[in-house]
Amino acid sequence: MTFVERIGSLAMVILLVGLFALGLGIISWIVEVLQRYNMPWQVYLVAIGLVLMLFAVIGAKIFSQD
């Protein structure tokens, strides 16, 4: 593995960790808002699922080789 490939891999790992942290922050904020308005647990699942799907699409687009 060359130096440039290692730097590229390191950048991808840092990007992935940042994306993961951003997703957790958004999910925790959404859960806090839903708790404030006493929403049922089904709404929690839908909101968390939508955020996870959104970040999965973003991650797939970022890490695709196209």
Image (spheres, rainbow, N blue to C red):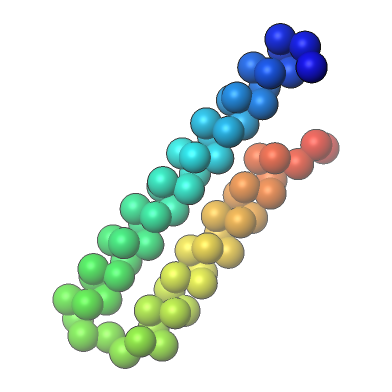
Q: Residue furthest top?
A: 3
Q: Relative to residue 41, is residue 52 depicted above or below?
A: above
Q: Residue at x 17, y 76 (%)?
A: 36
Q: Left or right: where does residue 24 sit relative to residue 6? A: left
Q: Is residue 3 above or below residue 66?
A: above
Residue 43 at x, y percent in the picture: 39, 83
- Please state, as top left, top right, bottom left or bottom right, where the N terminus lies in the image: top right
**For residue 18, above or below residue 46:** above
What residue appears at the point 23 percent right and 68 percent down from the top-left corner?
32
Q: Residue at x 62, y 31 (%)?
A: 12
Q: Residue furthest left?
A: 36
Name the outermost residue toward the right.
Answer: 66
Task: Tell me: 10 left or right of 20.
Answer: right
Determine the image quadrant of residue 11: top right
Q: Position of residue 41 (x, y in %)?
A: 35, 87
Q: Is residue 64 above or below residue 57?
A: above
